[in-house]
Image (tube, grey):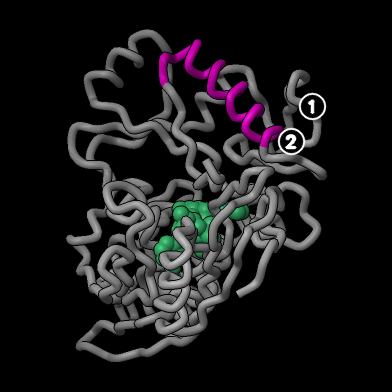
Amino acid sequence: MQENIALAGYTTLDIGGPARWFAEARSEADIVEAVEFARSRNLPLFVLGGGSNLLVADAGFPGLVLHIALRGLRREEDGTDTIFTVAAGEEWDSFVASTVAANCAGVECLSGIPGTVGGTPVQNVGAYGQEVSSTIQRVRALDRTTLQWVEFDNAACEFAYRSSLFNTTARQRYIVSEVTYRLRRGGAPLLTYKDLAQRFSQYETSALTLAAVREAVREIRHRKGMLLVEGDPDCRSAGSFFKNPVLAAAQFAQLAEKFDGIPHYPAGAGTMGAGFVKIPAAWLIEQAGFSKGATVDAVGDTVGISSRHTLALVNRGGATAANLLALRDAIRARVTARFGIVLEQEPVYLSGE
Ligand SMILES: Cc1cc2nc3c(=O)[nH]c(=O)nc-3n(C[C@H](O)[C@H](O)[C@H](O)COP(=O)(O)OP(=O)(O)OC[C@H]3O[C@@H](n4cnc5c(N)ncnc54)[C@H](O)[C@@H]3O)c2cc1C
């Protein structure tokens, strides 16, 4: 148990004040012990993974931050599938690399996403047409209210676009210790995303390997500043700062009457559900007058929009959480004024309030 530990370095945004208490959990027993410590002192407890979807307030957090550092991976074969059970503290992209090396399909398009395995079910991590909800078989977690270990099957996780039970109805209630993924051995890579499909359109099907798709995804991510690369100023971010708005088909139709050529993903795609249409937040932001690399005069230049992706807000050096929230508000206000849509923030905001 440590005291007054600076949190900024534990986040990809590199912003925020200290944690009053800080502990690292390397086992399930450590998790239980930390919860009991917090309970006995009536402290709020926050679970930290890789800090890649997190904005910490400038004043920090007055409770206990529990850093999940459980390691390990078990593998078992089941017919044509391979089942991987992975400890929550494992680095997500290293796990993806190992599945690709084992020629197992199902998470290859999620290559290059930072953070931990335990963070993936929380917001149903997704990219390039794939979401973890299509391969997660089981999530093991501690119920903080009962101190019992519980297991969720896929349906019980209530996955939807960038959401699950863990970040909605039961937010902060469960601490994930391991996640089980069912992948297809020798399965074909998923190529539903336009940029990826185009890149591989002239390839023979036999050349279309999981490794080639992983490489392509990482390359596209790098181009967009969405891959963590040491020294790259565009990746001092939390990835996409806003979710892509999901509109009821009727609401989308009304909007499409007013604005020509709104790009959109069709109703029912992925975990969106029939009758809903997803539109790219990046397009809305650009149409509202913000371009890549932009800053806002009233906010200052410690924060800005990534020069390679309109959805990523970056710390350009020395930024505070207040700076970033001011930039968020400026973007939101202009998008709402133009389109009547309130952009929803994707990263979690950790504060004492
Ligand atoms: C450059 C960049 C690119 C990104 N690209 C994508 C992308 O393409 N798609 C996408 O979906 N996301 C993306 N993200 C966001 C982020 O990487 C994911 O959301 C990731 O899964 C967060 O995991 P983490 O371990 O870093 O979680 P943290 O940021 O540490 O925490 C996020 C939330 O999850 C909770 N949490 C974390 N671990 C656990 C656990 N073991 N048990 C219970 N709760 C837990 C935390 O309490 C918090 O509420 C990107 C981020 C960056 C910086």
Q: What element carries label 2?
A: strand
Q: Which residue lies furthest to the top in this view?
A: 258
Question: Is residue 315 shown in magenta?
Answer: no
Question: Is residue 337 shown in magenta?
Answer: yes
At horizontal 49% and vertical 11% (from top left) the residue drawn is 338
Quadrant in which the N terminus is drawn: bottom right
- At label 1, the amino acid type is Gly
Residue 111 locus on image (x, y percent): 51, 65
- From which residue to which does the magenta span run? 322-341
Alpha-carbon span between mark 1 and mark 2: 7 Å
- Contact flag, marks 1 and 2 (Cβ < 8 Å): yes
- The overriding secondary structure of the stretch rendered in magenta is helix
Give the answer, above or below, for where 353 lies relative to 136. Answer: above
Label annotation for residue 300 = 1
Q: What element carries label 1?
A: loop
- Residue under circle 2? 303
Query: Looking at the image, which is closer to me, 211 or 138?
Result: 138
At horizontal 33% and vertical 10% (from top left) the residue drawn is 257
